Image (cartoon, rainbow, N blue to C red):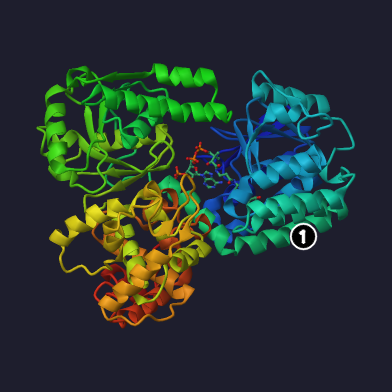
Amino acid sequence: MTAKYEAHGTVAVITLQNPPVNGLGFATRRDIAHGIEQAQADPAITAIVITGAGKAFSGGADIKEFGSPMAIAEPNLGTLIGICEAANKPIVAAIHTVCMGGGLELAMGCHYRVTAPGTSVALPEVKLGLLPGAGGTQRLPRVLGVETALNIIVSGDPVKSEVLASLPGQKLFDRVITGDLMEGAIAFAHEISATRPLPLVRNLKCTHPNADAYFQFTRNTVGAMSKNFPAPLRCIDAVAASTNQKIDAGLAFERKLFIELMQTPESKALRHAFFAERATSKIPDVPEDTAVRPVNKVAVIGAGTMGGGITMNFLNAGIPVVMLETKQEALDRGVATMRKNYEAQVAKGKLAQTKYEERMALLSTTLNYSDLGDSDLVIEAVFEELEVKKAVFGQLDAVMKPGAILASNTSTLDVNKIAHFTKRPQDVVGMHFFSPANVMKLLEVVRGADTAKDVLATVMQIGKKIKKTCVVSGVCDGFIGNRMIEQYSRQAGMLLDEGCTPSQVDKAIEKFGFAMGPFRMGDLAGNDIGWAIRKRRAVERPNMRYSLTADRLCEMGRFGQKTSAGWYDYKPGKRDAIPSALVEQMIVDYRTSIGRTPRKVSDEEIVQRLVFALVNEAAKILEEGIASRASDIDMVYLTGYGFPLHRGGPMCYADTVGLYNVAQAMKRFAQNPDDDPAFWQPAPLLARLVAEGKSFS
Ligand code: T1G
């Protein structure tokens, strides 16, 4: 039973029991309906209370059911709410902890609502590319007023129940129960059991003094902020209907919009991302109840950009950090940079001065490895040279207490080699942060061949604590993200050789939705970083083809914004990318030198070659077991590389396009001698999925 029925004297209590969040799946909806019928049929029962067991009243409709017949199997949520409204005995919703989406809609179908304080109340459907589809856009304005309701629906953000209960004129909550919720709810049910007529939200008036002007204003502001997502504007249309249509017409209109949104690729992408984010924490061969090691103190080696950013993550989470450098001035510089970052947040009102001081009080610095011994986790963020890592890990091995976790922030070096610079390879792991480390959500947790399972479980937990999206990667060159971005960048270079300009490539992929195209990104990150890696690659993989324009650019000293010149020109102190005639001439000269006749390349081909290069390399990464699931690769790109959220990530996008069509495009690219035919052979996994008519998900 996913909804338990119990009679408490003359009050029937129906308790949702569908862990983890009492999702309103078919069985739960059915059992609630049965409970209401049972209470109606029992003459001894004078009132009904509905509540939720565990950590939620209800987290809403069961998103896992979406797309399956169960999602709309009767009684669907609308029908169930209709059963509540038609009941001839009062129904009291007793809500607590979490009351979201369909859960709040169910509560608004009840005659009364009582709440424990601190309950998170939300209609988060918009974050799934939807809108409340069971009356939320018609009932919430009736109990909270149009403007408060619209803010809640368009933002999708939770508001505490006691805040809503304190709004003048609100009719969402009849009582805030500070003591035992069930006792209070049952007492309240007794109080109102004989009150007639039974109050119905649907009968409340819903008006706005300047409806047209108000909705026009909200459409302008919301439209400007939600250009890639249709749902927010539909939310406004639905709420507007609550002010100018009768409730049943409004409900029908809302239902129509909901069903349309459910079919949109944007909603599918957002729902995919919702589950993808939660799936990343599951490591196939590491049980979820694996005991973790305590992490009460962290050491960071290196006070540079990465070391400082990494340190701030832990200070922000209230975890003390000892930061080590080789020279005092490097330490001073690192601490000064952190202070500057915090002070900027304080100046913008994003951080309280007291919080800033609390965080800095958790920081200590040292020049001596002997001061690190009592740290539970040490993260090395020093120069990207294996010899340097060897020296550092040799020292760490000598001073760190047994059981301490030794992590490297390396982005390209072999974590297995690093592990074997110590006598405790089982305690060594990669923690690859993305710059700026205190801002970017992605953390690649690199699992060495010897990394112990509890070390992995510990790092995944501490990563979540510092608010990172942790994705486990196996050991390979570039792990998941950088290994894929290398093919993306290679294609970008070859597109220049074939006739494109940097701004044409950037504009095409930015129109697709990327935050920044490859050339603007190179100028931001520094073109010299890629240059160093290509030099190393040229030794390791001499036969990999790529355009030499990026090397020519670096030979011209054009490293990007930091030199006020890169692929683009920059006015000193400004970040606006200005196309550079000099660079475009360099590209023309380079084409001539390799005997290449430029051709017109369409934006569509640009986008396909960049994105499908990611997909093909990702298929190999999946096949090799470097990533354990396709959705993890999507999370890497959504949280670390500016891949557009409304596309769901490279793998989700490939599924949306259809893997057959992706493979067909690759075949076309393989016929282009100026490209890299060998690279465009579909990865074996991709070819297999295409042959079987399957998708990555
Ligand atoms: N359906 C199914 N599973 C859900 C779920 C839901 N609504 N919400 C959470 N889960 C799963 C989640 O996948 C994870 O599973 C576990 O619960 C814990 O989640 C008609 C149609 C409720 C605030 O959008 O915001 O109602 O990974 O890690 O941090 O208008 O989950 O353990 O297997 O997030 O304590 C609208 C989405 C649905 C709420 C709890 N509701 N959920 O946070 O736990 S659409 C939402 C959340 C709708 C109607 C429409 C949060 C939470 P697993 P968690 P948490």
Quadrant assignment, res 87: top right
Query: Is 666 in front, or is 129?
Result: 666
* Residue 76 showing in the rendered view: no
- In-image side of 491 versus 88 (left or right): left
Name the secondary structure under disc 1.
Answer: helix
* Residue 321 showing in the rendered view: yes
Query: Is 189 in front, or is 694?
Result: 694
Q: Position of residue 255 (x, y in %)?
A: 72, 59
Quadrant assignment, res 398: top left
Please state the total of marks drawn on the protein image: 1
- In-image side of 533 versus 492 (left or right): left
- In-image side of 94 versus 401 (left or right): right
Query: Is 69 in front, or is 632?
Result: 632
Q: Position of residue 350 (x, y in %)?
A: 56, 30
* Residue at (54% x, 32% y) in the render: 54
Residue type of the residue flagged with mark 1: Phe
Q: Residues within 10 Å of mark 1 (few under 14, many from 20)?
A: some
* Residue at (46% x, 18% y) in the render: 357
Q: Position of residue 483 (x, y in %)?
A: 28, 57
